[in-house]
Image (spheres, coloured by chain):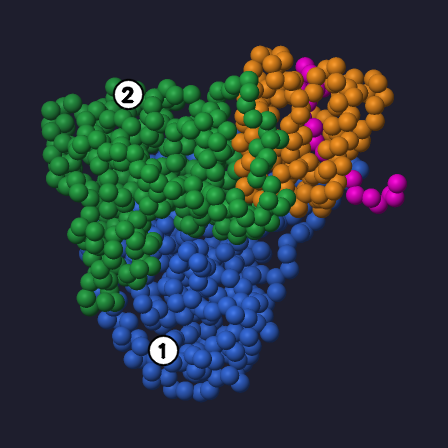
Amino acid sequence: MRKCALSKLPDVFEKIASEMTLFLPVDREDGRAEYQQWVPGKALSDALTTVKSPKDLFFPQTEDLMRFKVEGKKIAIDDIREDVEPFAVFGVRACDVRSLDILDRVFLTEPRDSYYAEKREKGVVVSLSCEKPAETCFCTAFGIDPLTSAGDVAVWKTETALFFKANTEKGGAFLKIIEELTEDTAGEEVEAVKAKTEKILQKLPLRDVPVNAFGGGKTQALFDRPEWDTLSESCLGCGTCTFVCPTCQCYDIKDFSAGNAVIRYRCWDSCMYSEFTKMAHGNNRVTQKERFRQRFMHKLVYFPENHDGLFSCVGCGRCLRSCPVSMNIVKVMRKIGGKHNA
Amino acid sequence: MQKMTREALLEKARELLSSGKVSAVLGWKKGEFDYDVTPAVFDSVDALEDFVWGDFCGANLSKYLIKETKKHRVLVFLKPCDTYSMNQLLTEHRFEREQVHAVGVPCDGMADINLLRRKAGEGIVSVDSIGEEIKVETLYSDEPVIIDRREVLLERCVNCKSKKHAAFDELLSDAGEDSSSDRFQDVEKLESMTPDERFEFWQNELSRCIRCNACRDVCPACTCETCVFNNPSSGAENKAPVNSFEEQMFHIIRAFHVAGRCTDCGECARVCPEHIPLHLINRKIIKDMNAFYGVFQAGAEVGAKSPLLDYTVSDIEPGAVFDGRDHDA
Amino acid sequence: MPINEYKPLIVAFCCNWCSYAGADLAGNNRANYPCDVKIIRVPCSCRVNPMFILKAFQRGADGVILCGCHPGDCHYTSGNYFTRRRMAVLFSLLDFFGIERERTRVEWISAAEGAKFAATMNEFTKTVAALGENRRLEDLRCKK
């Protein structure tokens, strides 16, 4: 484990930024935080979560795929993807690290998504252990440990120092960059910080959401539950939950006719939208109830069924904070699966 | 704290449900916490157990009437500002008035959970309003944090335009009065900037837009069956803000499409996950129309003609709207 | 005139009954106006909704002008009165967003005013040329 004084953090950032692009959560004027590229003067936010997740950096909301140009009787196809430079994402919470594992399962299995893969290869994920979980946190219900986070490098913060531990080869190379600024340590202080936060984790009101009521193989049992009617009645059909979610991975591929060429790009899509997966015959989910159910069944039943029991919710609590009508996955789980986990 | 009690609303709901005058009640339902209140339909007296009324019942229930009146005769609880939206929907013939029993609830201003979080800190486990104080318990403070309620009101409540219900079948209190608010102050501040500063201001705000469409979907004036932005054959459909042009186009068109119909209920700004001050765009339009065509409040009365559906032969010319406000250009 | 001099692209929405005929007359009279003005004929100035104007800017227009019958002369009695209100509100809103107010204009041009049509286009093109390229409502994808 390596250690550096908290006061040296700007130097650490500067050193990293001299080698690669650095992204980190930065406080905004409205009191929330967002991932921004580091430039001198920008400080790491203390906020627990950002409005949007770091998913953006690996799977951007919009991404150009290719361009078609008609030249005479031929169509020229250009690959117009942007070059990806090596980059580091600093301060990723454990929930968001898990979300990347979930996205990997979607994008890195065959057929491999080369756009996503390139960013995953060139990006170093530097996680940050949680010190002050919020009441909206329930990552532990999904077996995530917010105190021993994964990622390429794990970081713990105490009041005076930062502790770094490499988890992967890429993480080791990353620590080499800041080697001069850090020193070896056994890291006893880390345990003290962990113990303090552990106490809070025990107090979190949502720690025991009923995950066991969900999972693979439960489609038949849950699909026609009458609760979906009342749960979905307030849903506006906006895409807020989807777009702040670190694991939602649905996208649409669209063509933009720019006059002189056609640009094919992809953008995030939301299963809450009426035109989601619209086909020639129309739409296969015509009511908001069906669309609403799809989102939660996907996260809690279909995904674990297809991916060894892994839920595609990480309990980050973003949708709890952002939903315009405060309808969210915790309410769904508790209404259908009971108040506490059995 | 709201002066009107939950019990008073409940009593009304029970009475009308059990008498069969209505078959459903539109109200607010308690969540996992004291602050995450959800709009909900209650179709039985038993279901009313989860009914709540308090400082976090900001959601405007009028838009749900379109859907619910097709199934039920509905009792709806409306705060003063919500009644304007109902009137506007009636003006546009979006539902049958007979299907609604509107109960006017007085409102003392609603709290903004985001402001509360900034004041009280993270980890809010309980919120309790007593008089003008809000008592907040968090995971990180041994003692409850006491916050002045007036400091955490929603923007639209700070600039409340009216405590008077524009429509109701019955009122739970005495009739309120129009408030004298300074709601155009922020618009004026922007107007006094140079175009470059304004452009920068909006670029900065709109660049955060994630095109979740919450502002549109929550808006009681946005009730098109298919929005132009969702319609693949409109030529304008798009699902993402690809660049600053598309960010601007969406917000200009969204605001313009409700011009003359926007009651300034402030829901768009309340729900924006990125905290973009969207109400300023609508207010700019209201302010301009008031100046050009006389003061008009959408939803003040059913059937009133919006300024954009009307004209006089001596209207201001588009080229003349900037006369008298040339500070730099 | 130097070859590389910047020439703005102007989109002119012209109502079928007055302004389009006015443009026709300008042509018949051999009145000069810049070839960078692209005319789009609409049944009435009232047909133009704000999306048309924004789309014109997106596709590379540097200025958009909307021409209709003189107030009182609308072929459909009142279409241009509605246009007048809409555009007054829209132009003020665009200005609120910091878009240069000189890039948009409404003019009333009758079928008999060929000379006014040409003069208006000359003057508008000059005004927009002085502003330079439209940078604030541009979509770079359309410019590559």
What shade does chain B have? Answer: green
- Give the percent coordinates (x, y) of residue B273: 40, 49
Label 2 sits on what residue type? Answer: Arg
Label disc, if present, on residue A158 of the rendered structure: 1
- Residues at marks 2 and 1, CA–CA distance in whole angstroms: 61 Å
Rendered blue, the chain in question is: A
Kindly identify the residue that appears in the image at 33 percent across and 38 percent down: B180
- Give the percent coordinates (x, y) of residue B6: 15, 41
Label disc, if present, on residue B150 of the rendered structure: none
Crowding at mark 2 (Cα within 10 Å: few <14, some 14-19, many 20+): some
- Give the percent coordinates (x, y) of residue A17: 57, 72
Q: Nearer the viewer, mark 2 or mark 1?
A: 2
Kindly identify the residue that appears in the image at 58 percent across and 70 percent down: A20
Choose top left, top right, bottom left or bottom right for residue C65. top right
Kindly identify the residue that appears in the image at 48 percent across and 20 percent down: B310
Chain part drawn in magenta: C1-21
What shade does chain C have? Answer: orange
Choose top left, top right, bottom left or bottom right for residue A130. bottom left
**Both on one chain, marks 2 and 1?**
no
Kindly identify the residue that appears in the image at 33 percent across and 83 percent down: A189
Nearer to us in this view, A145 or A182: A182
**Does C32 appear above or below B325?**
above
Please check the rendered image and state whether residue B249 is part of the magenta-colored stretch, yes or no.
no
Label 1 sits on what residue type? Answer: Thr
Q: Element at badge 1?
A: loop
Q: Is residue B84 left or right of residue C8?
A: left
Q: Is residue A24 left or right of residue C37?
A: left
The residue where tag 2 is placed is B97
Nearer to us in this view, C90 or A26: C90
